Image (tube, grey):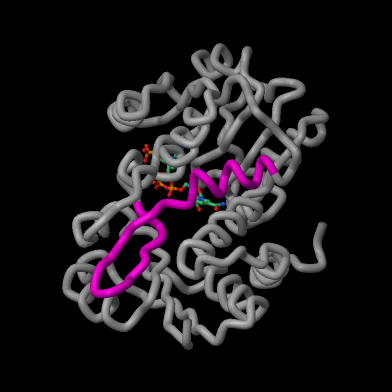
């Protein structure tokens, strides 16, 4: 492959880790490609799509386009079709092919940490990331309960993917967690100091693995609490790196230089010298 252009499209994209991570990957693999972040406001996706498709060899897609991009594609992978969301696009021979690497990235992060398989998972949140994680866990035969604050959205996810749904409230959550060996935070709660997605009075099950998708900060209040209880913890940055590595592999057909990507991601998050 000669030098090609890749892009992240979304809004906002400033502060995204993907450009640093993918550029580091191309460099480490000896590829002369460029990767840029392009702010595409929600209303402009359709109008700007022909130019993006013509000028790039591949895209990462983030909020608010992960679902809206689907009708613009010529083909979609079974995994992306199952969750109705795309985060990686390959543009080849005038055709656009969509994939989702979030679920596989989540599973890869667990595997790399030497954790799993898990028997029963509770996922907090019922948005796009919860969908990807729930589908990936189901595919590996883990029983899944999603706990969401908006009943209709949570129910729809549960029906689409054949998992259980409960309200993100102390009673139902305590019951769901009693038998769980994996707890996943797929809400944005934890981005602020001391903020946690678990309602007051709900304990983390002892011995469970706790995976927080929030990656800023790396060590959220939920993970700190889990670690203090002796739980195995996985930081969101690990999924960020693995989903990016899978995008790289889809675009190039070559194994991703995961360590170089991880270093670049941590540097971009300003935490390279951290844990
Ligand atoms: P999303 O589609 O907007 O879904 C967010 C979910 O969180 C929704 O179910 C929402 O509930 C719930 N939520 C938001 N605020 C809440 C609150 N105050 N109380 C209770 N529930 C609340 O977002 P997403 O794409 O799934 O992303 C979720 C998080 O995962 C984000 O922080 C994102 O950065 C992170 N993420 C990380 C990675 C990674 O690689 N580490 C990958 C993907 C996403 P409603 O349905 O009621 O609105």
Taking depth in this image into account, of 272 and 6 the one nearest to the observer is: 6
Residue 66 is left or right of residue 211, and the answer is left
Q: Residue at x 37, y 22 (%)?
A: 162
Q: Residue at x 62, y 46 (%)?
A: 108
Residue 192 visible, this orientation: no
Observer able to see residue 189: yes
View extreme (left): residue? 47
Is residue 149 depicted above or below 257 in this figure?
above
Q: Position of residue 268 (x, y in %)?
A: 65, 72
Q: Quadrant of ligand 1?
A: top left
Report the span colored magenta.
86-111
Question: Is 94 within the magenta?
Answer: yes
Q: Residue at x 45, y 44 (%)?
A: 129
The residue shown at (24%, 60%) is 73
Quarter of the image where the C terminus is located: bottom right
Find residue 35 and report its horizontal and vertical position in percent: 48, 79
Above-or-below relation of 131 to 77: above
Question: x and y percent of residue 214 in the render?
Answer: 58, 49
């Amino acid at each position: 492959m000669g030098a090609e252009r890749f892009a992240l499209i979304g809004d906002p994209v400033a502060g995204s880790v993907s450009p640093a991570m993918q550029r580091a990957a191309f460099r480490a693999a000896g590829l002369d490609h460029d990767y840029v972040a392009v702010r595409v406001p929600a209303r402009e996706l359709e109008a700007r799509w022909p130019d993006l498709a013509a000028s790039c060899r591949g895209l990462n897609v983030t909020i608010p386009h992960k679902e809206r991009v689907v009708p613009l594609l010529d083909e979609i992978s079974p995994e992306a079709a199952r969750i109705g969301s795309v985060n990686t696009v390959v543009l080849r021979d005038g055709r656009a092919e969509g994939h989702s690497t979030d679920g596989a990235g989540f599973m890869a992060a667990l595997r790399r940490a030497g954790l799993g398989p898990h028997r029963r998972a509770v996922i907090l949140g019922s948005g796009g990331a919860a969908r990807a994680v729930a589908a990936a866990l189901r595919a590996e035969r883990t029983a899944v309960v999603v706990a969401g604050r908006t009943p209709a959205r949570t129910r729809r996810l549960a029906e689409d993917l054949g998992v259980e749904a409960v309200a993100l409230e102390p009673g139902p959550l305590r019951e769901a967690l009693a038998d769980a060996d994996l707890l996943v935070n797929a809400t944005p709660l934890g981005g602020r100091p001391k903020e946690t997605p678990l309602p007051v009075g709900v304990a983390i099950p002892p011995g469970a693995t706790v995976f927080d998708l929030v990656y800023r900060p790396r060590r959220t209040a939920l993970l700190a609490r889990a670690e203090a209880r002796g739980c195995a913890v996985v930081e969101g940055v690990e999924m960020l790196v693995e989903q990016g590595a899978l995008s790289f592999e889809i675009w190039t057909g070559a194994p991703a230089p995961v360590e170089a990507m991880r270093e670049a991601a941590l540097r971009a998050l300003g935490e390279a010298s951290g844990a």
